[in-house]
Amino acid sequence: QVQLVESGGGSVQAGGSLTLSCVASGRTFSRYPMGWFRQAPGKEREFVAAIGLNGDEQYYTDSVKGRFSISRDNAKNTVYLQMNSLNLEDTAVYYCGTRRDVYASASIFLHEYNYWGQGTQVTVSS
């Protein structure tokens, strides 16, 4: 079965950087798009970034454009989220997700993701 394992979260001061990683297993990684979502306390899970099969197709939510960068290494079955210039509003649990359909396009829509990791906490302090 598909398994996603996130890592790299932690506590950082505002303006700092973190890189999240998500390792996938259970199927051929390069055939599926990947995405990052986040959920802050008391809020719904929201889209952050998504990437297509070979990395050329990328999408970002407006609040992270220019600060976050999504990438993937198909040889390592891993997707990354490089987060720079972090601010207090970035505090959340970050989830890695993927879609069920092979060769699907990258998606910004939560309902189109079928598999999720356990999440990794990112806390930004002033």
Image (cartoon, rainbow, N blue to C red):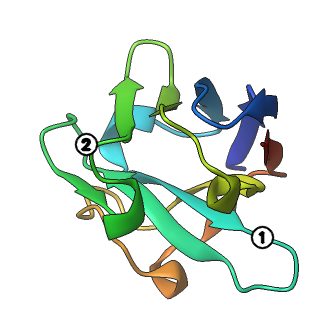
Q: Residue 96 carries which label?
A: none
Q: Where is residue 121 in the image (x, y as percent from the top left)?
A: 84, 46
| Residue 99 in sight | no
Which residue lies under the disc numbered 1? Answer: 40
Q: Determine the residue positioned at 80% across, 51% down.
A: 119
Query: Mark 1 or mark 2, which is nearer to you?
Result: 1
Q: In which quarter of the image is the C terminus?
A: top right
Q: Where is residue 110 in the image (x, y as percent from the top left)?
A: 52, 80
Along the viewing direction, whichever of 45 and 102 lies nearer the viewer = 45
Q: Residue furthest left?
A: 56
Q: Determine the residue positioned at 42% across, 81% down.
A: 109
Amino acid found under the numbered disc labelled 1: Ala
| SS type, badge 1 | loop
On the rendered structure, is 120 left or right of 52? right
The crowd level at tag 1 (other Cα within 10 Å; few <14, some 14-19, many 20+) is some
On the rendered structure, is 55 left or right of 14? left
In the displayed structure, 108 sits above or below 2; it is below
How many numbered markers are drawn? 2
In the displayed structure, 110 sits above or below 83; it is below
Q: Determine the residue positioned at 77% across, 70% down.
A: 40
Q: Where is residue 78 in the image (x, y as percent from the top left)?
A: 52, 26
Along the viewing direction, whichever of 6 and 69 lies nearer the viewer = 69
Which residue lies under the disc numbered 2? Answer: 53
Disc 1 from disc 2: Cα separation: 28 Å
Along the viewing direction, whichever of 111 and 75 lies nearer the viewer = 111
Q: Do the residues labelled 1 and 2 touch (CB within 8 Å)?
A: no
Q: Determine the residue positioned at 74% across, 25% down.
A: 8
Amino acid found under the numbered disc labelled 2: Leu
